[in-house]
Amino acid sequence: MLQLLLNALALGASYALLALGFVLILNATSAVNFAHGDVVMLGGYTAIALHALLQWPGAFLLPLVLAVMALLGLVFSLGAYFPLKDRPPVSVFISTIALGIVFQNATNAIAGAEPRKGPALFGEGQVNFGNVAIGEQAMAIIGAAALLIAGQHLLFRYTGLGRRLRATAQDRQMAEAVGISVNRMIGLTFAIGAGLAGAAGLMLANTFFASPTDGSNYILKAYIAVTIGGWGNLYGAVCGAMFIALFEVLYPSLPILVPLLKSTTPWLFSQTMSSILLYVGLLAIMFFRPQGLFGEAIQKRV
Amino acid sequence: MKRLLSWLGIDVRAPLLAGAVGLAIWPFLFTSNYDLRVFTIVGIYAMLALGFQLIFGHAGALALTQGCFFGVGAYVTGILATRFGLSGELTLLLSALIPVLLAIVIAAPVLRLESHYFALATLGIGQVMLLIAIAWQDVTGGSNGLAGIPPMRLFGVEFGKGYGILGLVWVFVIAGAWASHRITRGLYGAALCVARENPVAAQSIGIDTSALRYATFLLSALYAGIAGAMYAHTVRVVSVEALEFPIMVACLTIAVVGGRTHIAGAILGAVLVVNLPEWFRDLEKTYLIAYGMALLAMIIIAPDGLIGLMQRLRTRWFGAPAPVLPQNAQRPAQNSNAGAAQTQTPPRDTRLARIPKGEPLLTIEGVTKRFGGLTALSSVSMQVHPGEIFGLIGPNGSGKTTLINIVSGAYTGDAGKVMLVGTPLSGQASFQIARSGVARTFQNVNLVDDLSVIDNVAVARFGAEQAALGDAFTPGRSGRAWHNARDCALRLLEAFDIQALADQPAGSLAYGIKRKVEIARALALDPMLLLLDEPAAGLNEAEQLDLAQRLRRFSDCGLSVLVIEHNMPFLMPLVDRVACLDRGEVIAMGLPEDVRNSTQVITAYLGAPDTGAAPPIRDAALAHTS
């Protein structure tokens, strides 16, 4: 049970990084980055490639992956966002979908379609505390993700740069009016968002492997997390990510945890069923509380 | 001959005609089974994209369900034909209808979402369908799919491999293109355009934007379902590939590369997208990278697609096509019943006779509105009588626009009620309020820039002409409604002396003219009450005087006007009564003279008087507040 919870927390931590990057970009540009899931996937492959090259453990690769993905995020914004920033938002959706397709198929062409296993942060063994065995990887993920989220929080909350980034996300025109170089801030937000997504990719690639078509799954996870947490709400998104992970890990284990359910048909508690339920739940949330579970309704100005 | 040349020369039709002829000849030039099959697939994708254009191009909603509807259509045919042995007519019918049913189910939670929420939600629905198809092995065959789908048989005729299925598919493409063309022109098409470009304005002129979205969403599912059925009979195998994202990608690429709203765009896009991987065999596995790059390049360089590019080039080389105005442009205004109240010497509004004497037209009673902790309006009450021009003044942020937004249904009040001749307006959607006789303009002009002046106004006749989707298939109906609407619009433009600009795109006009167009559009609703939000802002003095005279003339015919204005020299002589709002409360109401001299009003505008300051100076200052 403890191991199960820990796994759920580790998965939730990776999802949190992914959702956080998604919301940061959403807030700064009011555009959805449809390629965000593919960026996670690329993060995983970057880690695998660097691991093959350097043979370092994942924890030492993490800064490298962050840097590479941040650079990619910057390039991404130059290709998919800046040329279209004055056009209707649908243009940016399409441009990010387009780049997502390119990422996905380029990865497929270079690395092949079969799933690959990413490096562990430190090791994959178990640590025994008394009679409870705890996975090293899960603990390492939780630690690393907590560090990254704390870093993001400190950067945004307590530095001048963070204030400029937040100002840009809150009101771009106002930020520009007080002399903030808005474009630079948006580019930087893309870099941070992609870096966090890349870190998530590195963490997920060890347990769940990486394959080129992972992107659409991850973007949906980010979307669900953000919908649960309330659009634009950074810490709501982190909570939403945790919730999804708990559900995903615990739901298929219900027959093990609750003996009463053991006799039910196997498909009822399959992975697939949990994904479907998660999604149907999302539709229900959108129907009854379109502002998210924690979010406040935003009144449109006429 | 000259006309023929110019017809060929200035219009985009010439290359399109050539393209159509080329397409018709194609299957007789490349006759191998393989070529015929590719050409059939082109038709299937064209059908898919024609449907996608309705929701994506015309309704402006990026629905990533189109590939999913296609896959569902294909699976329905596959399952029913192989497992239940149903006849071709039945499988086709169900393949078309089940995606529509699915669309109806998901429309409720999803369709009212704003753009990106909507796109992501639809992406998720596709993912769920894919998961179900993989997991529900007993029925769908799991990841192996279903093999052995029989060739298409309809009413005893078999449409087998080669020309048979090819012909059938292209018959559907032509029928689909024709239907799409009929639907997207005229009043209904113009309403789609306004709803897409400016939903707030569309609501304000009585267009139910969600109904339009809903209709196009269901139609797009219908097209996709038919395309899916055709695909199942062409490929004869249905596997999870039919539900996977690349189909959606191809469909999106077709619509973006070809053109989002032009029928030829769907077909041209399909020809390119299906054939490019065939033409560039060397890229075999990486053709999707090419799709992605093409998509990105097109969205940056030519967002209207290749057909849009052609139209732009035509305009650059040959000038804009001659606009077509209603035939009776020079005819003196007649007393037709539609829009009679807006002609230059209009008769009195007959609806007023039904209002008992002394009864107000609009009653606002105890209306309260809070935004979070801020009370924008607190228990505001006032009445507007038939034929009255009622002014609403007050400092910035006093709640004037909020009040208009509540009356017009853009906001819902937290307490109180709004009644129009005894009928409550509160709780109704803004399009319903607009249809029941309350028209409005906006503080920031809300017109569709790309649409001509006359069409901007004509589209407000949507409700009056009872335009509907079915018009497309009733001979003569659509054309007649559009003609009537434009006729009425032209007369309204004449009433403002701007008929000469009728064919100009609204975006190209001077600000003052835009304001007039917006008022003309509001009047096209044939309203009993007109809500004007700062109509004189940005007008010079001559224009202001002109506007005041015209408003007076309309009110003499029975139109009531509720007007927000800061410009006192414009407002005070115009209105019959005035109310002044300050911090959400009515602080004065009555004749213009009385309100102007009210100390409370003066205080609200200029702050508390200092001891000894001379009142006349303040009075003069207020008179020139603008």
Image (cartoon, helix red, strand yellow):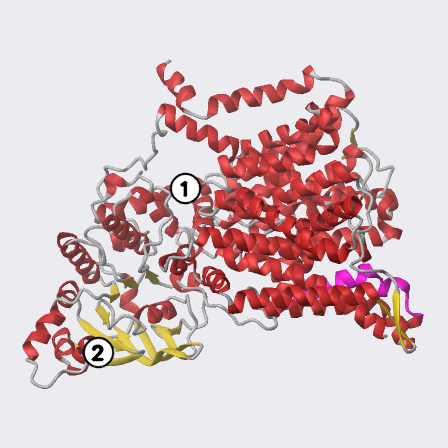
> Which span is picked out in magenta?
A263-286
Q: Nearer the viewer, residue A205 or B130?
A: A205
Percent across and percent down for residue B485 are 36, 46
Rendered image quadrant of residue A53: top right
Q: Is residue A302 left or right of residue B81?
A: left
The chain that hosts pointer 2 is: B
Q: Amino acid at mark 1?
A: Arg
Q: Which mark is residue B604?
A: 2
Look at label 2 and name its amino acid: Ala
Left or right placement of residue A226 versus residue B134 in this view: left
Residue situated in front as seen by the camera: A67 or B271 = A67
What residue is shown with label 1?
B480
Residue under the point 46% across and 59% down? A168
Q: Quadrant of residue B480?
A: top left
Per the model, the C-alpha gap separating discs 1 and 2 is 53 Å
Q: Position of residue A34 (x, y in %)?
A: 62, 50
